[in-house]
Image (tube, grey):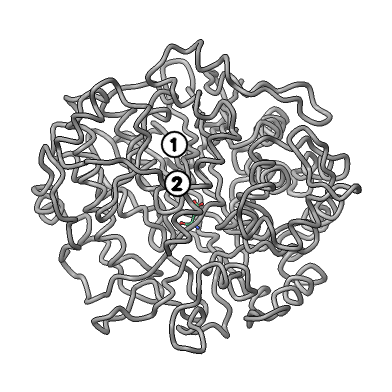
Amino acid sequence: MIQRRSLRFTALFAALLIAGGGLAGSLAAAKPKAAAHAAAPVWPLAGDPTVPIEPRAAFAPHVMVAAANPLAVQAGLKVLKAGGSAADAAVAIQAVLGLVEPQSSGLGGGAYMTYYDAKTRTVTAYDGRETAPAGAGPDLFVGPDGKPLAFFTALLSGRSTGVPGAIAMLSLVQHEHGKLAWSTLFADGQRLGDGGFIVSPRLAGFVHGPFPESKAPDAVRYFSKPDGRLVVAGDRLKNPAYAASLRTIAAEGPKGLLEGRIARDIVARLHEGDLPSSMTLADLAGYRPRAEKALCNPWKTYVVCTPQPESSGVSLLQALAMLEHTDIDRRGPTDPVSWVQIAEAERLMYADRDRYVGDPMFVGVPVAGLLDPAYVASRAAAIGQSAAPTPPSFGLPPMAAAMGPDATSEAHGTSHMVIVDADGNVLSMTTTVESIFGSGRMVDGFFLNNQLTDFSFSPLNPDGLPAANAVAAGKRPRSSMAPVIVLDRSGGFVAALGSPGGSSILSYDLKTMIGVFDWKLPMQQAIALPNMVARGASFSSEPELYAPGVVAALKTRGIPSLGGFGENSGVQGIIKRKGGYEGGADPRREGIARGF
Ligand code: GLU
């Protein structure tokens, strides 16, 4: 675990470094805009007109897209211009992201989507989470000595891969809400795969980074040029195998991935090496995305919607509800007490989340109890003007069964997109291969996820109670991914946002919500606010981004040091304003918002 932490810190550092303008961009909260923009990277994009990465934010009257790479945003806008819906655009965006941002998401990964249907004013949660094969059991990540496997041993093994669900989920969403033919939505991904795309600074940083996934043989082979050197930012990288896989999926739908030749390639690759997977063709062919009513909770004058567990959206809703018991809305980002309140709400939230959230098909998750107003009020009573000297324990929400804390760890490969279409339909989708380049194993031009490492490695805790997030056959690992949609009390759309970031996702979403709704900031400024991630005894943040005096004041209020965190945020958000939509994209990564 120690090794993993230090690697995570290195990753943060590298990511800030290679993002070039990333750090400068995030300083926008504290420094004049011009200074932030001067250092921002602009790079030419393959076969397309130059797409500047600045400004990140946009305002447009009819439609808006915000995603983690400008080429993906362009692909989405093209679909919307052709009369496509948000669901259509999401397919095109995912097809490009899987190519240009393979460290984050792709054909081999999973996703969650929160979807607002403008006609019915309802919010549906789509769950495309990877699933453990039928042959997986509680000892999946337990070694022959009876101890949990080392994290990276597990991650790089065939066992880490769950049945990929992102494409099956998108197919379901597009079937229900699409306007264009599925087969037409992959054109940009195919063109960029065949003709090549320009490697971005962030991708190059991961290719050259000190990460076991980057050193995996498939990754090294893919990213090596004919002269044996690894690609660098600005190089053109072709991936005809990826384009061919897209053609198959375009023609056959998710069956093209989960049945037939590609499925056979996946199974074969997962059975190679030590610790092979038990995955079979039947596991792949049997994958079904879930669709259910989103989990919505009133907050202030709004209703906030997220996916149901095994997503941790319930915990974000709980933290928002706890903060309603404070005066944070009358304070602002320059008041140190605001950040204490955020940190304390997060510590309470994570303590409960880590205890109770798992796949509801397998464990009882006390959703109503966690959001019960009296329970929330009792938890919120612990939030003061200084951080408590000892980390909070989990609480006892009504209807909760006895569950042990678990040993779940989450890593760095995820992406978030938000889309509003011309009919006012909105989607918020977090998509992932879990770690950087997933398990580092590739088939047919794409990386396979290592999402099963999001399960608790230990099925039982030391007191013998079962972990809610223990491995089981056919189970979906708990996720921190929590794509948000905010409505007004009459069901009208107000905002959509979300982020990658492993377990920090909940904190990134929370901060952005407070920035936009309590402090009334523009979406872009809310995204650029410092990230504060407080969990247990650790407080992680970006000290250089606070207003003068805040860090010193936090020291006197029980937050003596602010370390680095594992994975920086990649928040994308859209808010409805008078006359149109305001979109924002996280300056810590390479995303942009654009509309028309
Ligand atoms: N796999 C993590 C989850 O589902 C997300 C990882 C990340 O954000 O990088 O919660």
* Residue 281 visible in the displayed image: no
Q: How far from the left and from the top, in percent, is residue 190?
A: 82, 45
Residue holding disc 1: 496
Query: In the drawing, does residue 350 fall left or right of residue 492?
Result: left
Q: Toward the viewer: 119 or 263?
A: 263
The three-letter amino acid code for the residue at tag 1 is Ala
Residue 289, given in percent of the width and then of the height, sits at 56, 63
Residue at 12 percent across and 40 percent down: it is: 386
Screen quadrant of the C terminus: top right
Comes first in the chain, label 1 or label 2: 2
Q: Looking at the image, is 209 positioned above or below residue 530?
A: below
Cα–Cα gap, marks 1 and 2: 8 Å
Q: Residue at x 48, y 23 (%)?
A: 581
Disc 1 Cβ-to-ligand 1 distance below 8 Å? no
Nearest the eye: 125 or 134: 134
Check disc 2 and report the residue beneath it. 483
Q: Quadrant of residue 448?
A: bottom right
Circles 1 and 2: CB atoms closer than 8 Å: yes
| Residue 498 located left or right of residue 535 | right
- CA neighbours of label 2 inside 10 A, class few (<14), some (14 to 19), many (20+): many
Q: Residue at x 51, y 84 (%)?
A: 143
Q: Position of residue 156 (x, y in %)?
A: 62, 68
